[in-house]
Amino acid sequence: MPRETLRRQLENLHGELAAGEPLDAELRERLREVADDIEQLLSEGSRESDASTAERLRRHVKRATVNFETEHPRLAGILEGLADTLAKLGL
């Protein structure tokens, strides 16, 4: 169930990026890193490889959330949801 939630949240993130909300290059790159890490996490089968991807993803989500909270609250909300789902997955 949490992996399905993670997939839906990834779709939301892609939707927000596609909507063209004005973002500077650094913030857009951070979101791409988060999306890439989530896609990798979802495609990996072994829990061992999940651990390194999950750690990197947690760092990316945390940094991105802090940057988005004031200027891009919708994106910050998506990122907070991702963080919650990762915690539920034990990652």
Image (cartoon, rainbow, N blue to C red):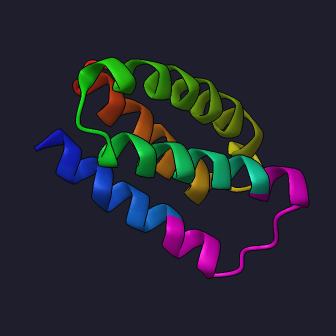
Instruction: Give the image quarter of residue 16.
Output: bottom right
Q: Is residue 54 left or right of residue 31?
A: left
Q: Is residue 1 visible?
A: yes
**Where is the N terminus found, in terms of image quarters?**
top left
- Residue 2 point in image, percent of width and height: 18, 40
Q: Nearest the camera: 50 or 63?
A: 50
- Residue 30 point in image, percent of width and height: 72, 46
- Residue 60 point in image, percent of width and height: 64, 33
Q: Which residues are magenta?
A: 14-28
Q: Count every numbered label the image shows and give the total.
A: 0
Q: Residue at x 32, y 23 (%)?
A: 87
Q: Residue at x 24, y 28 (%)?
A: 46
Q: Nearest the camera: 91 or 24?
A: 91
From what the image shows, is residue 15 above or below residue 83?
below
Q: Is residue 77 visible?
A: no
Q: Is 18 part of what is drawn in magenta? A: yes
From what the image shows, is residue 13 above or below residue 6?
below
**Where is the C terminus found, in terms of image quarters?**
top left
Q: Residue at x 53, y 25 (%)?
A: 58
Dominant secondary-structure state across the stretch colored magenta: helix
- Residue 18 point in image, percent of width and height: 61, 79
